[in-house]
Amino acid sequence: MNRLSDIRTIKDILSRHGFTFSKALGQNFLVNPSVCPRMAEASGAGNGVGVLEIGPGIGVLTNELCQLADKVVAVELDKRLLPVLEETLGEYDNVKVVNADVLKLDLDRLIAEEFAGLEAVVCANLPYYITSPVIMKLLEDRLPVKAITVMVQKEAAQRICAPVGSRESGAVTVSVNYYAKPELLFHVSAGSFMPAPKVDSAVIRLNVLEQPPVQTDEALFFRVVKAAFSQRRKVIANSLSSGLGLGKAEVAALLERAGVSAQSRAERLTLEDFASIANQL
Ligand code: SAM
């Protein structure tokens, strides 16, 4: 078993480095030894694969990834963790730690520079305060990655992985499904982290699509999705009218041309419905 997964080892490392957790940076570190191997395995890390990790913390997941993949690049914002990672990853020569804010990095360039000749995947226990922005950045930047395997809050996982057109779906469900096929892999209890967060978590995998499943003007498609879900309990005619700033008659004609019932609600529409509305706009 990876010695780093042992809670006594983790506590010892943290106390030797005088490390204190930052709530603002979403620092809840994994201390359940069974989770990281499962996540690393599910991410597709292996021969010929380069893994981009976001927020390695003290390197528990990084350790597993280094054992499976050809190369691992881990982006960590908190510079206090750099000496810790130097110690915990010292035995690997296939890892690089980048001290940066993932939201400000040119990830396309990083992947091209670091993973030439390798297939790239993303694997991360995400800081929860930026779950959606990170996931959307990874998808919208059209990075050449095969899959994105991430730990997120259970509620976020359920929302992202809900079927499009179901009650549980939301704008994020539709947006993610435009780029990828999401899968909920397994649940992880709050007690698997130190400090324990208030909510449970889940690991999801987004299998990135080569082509979007619908043909549409992307900017308009996402404007329609945002407007439709801005008032999700209202019928689509009303939410689009206020969300897009169009008159009632204009929206009625638009929906008729798109073949979508004015009385439907956003959560009941399919990707094709949203594309059809965008294409008629
Ligand atoms: N991977 C570790 C684990 O599973 O134990 C730590 C996960 S912890 C939930 C999130 C990590 O992301 C922390 O190490 C935190 O410092 C880092 N982080 C927070 N915001 C970040 C950002 N904007 N860019 C890169 N890393 C960030």
Image (cartoon, rainbow, N blue to C red):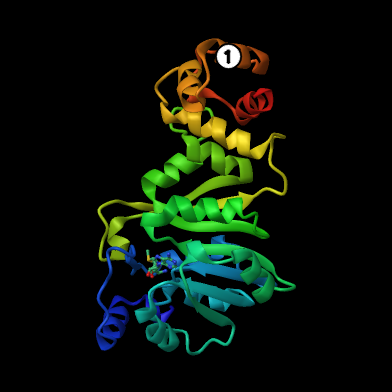
* Residue 92: % across, % down: 54, 86
* Residue 249: % across, % down: 55, 10
Q: Nearer the viewer, residue 275 or 200?
A: 275
**Residue 91 located left or right of residue 116:** left
Quadrant showing the N terminus: bottom left
Instruction: Tell me which amino acid carries mark 1.
Output: Glu
Check the image and report above or below for 106 versus 73.
above
Which quadrant of the structure image shows residue 18?
bottom left
The outermost residue toward the right is 117
Quadrant showing the C terminus: top right
- Quadrant for ligand 1 reads bottom left
How many other residues sit within 10 Å of disc 1, few (<14), some (14-19) or many (≥20)? few
Q: Which residue is mark 1?
A: 250
* Point 50% across, 16% down: residue: 237
* Point 36% across, 67% down: residue: 30
- Would you say residue 186 is visible in this rendering? no
Check the image and report above or below for 267 versus 134.
above
Q: Nearer the viewer, residue 102 or 177?
A: 102
Which quadrant of the structure image shows residue 231?
top left
* Residue 102: % across, % down: 49, 65
Q: Regarding mark 1 in the picture, which secondary structure is present there?
A: helix
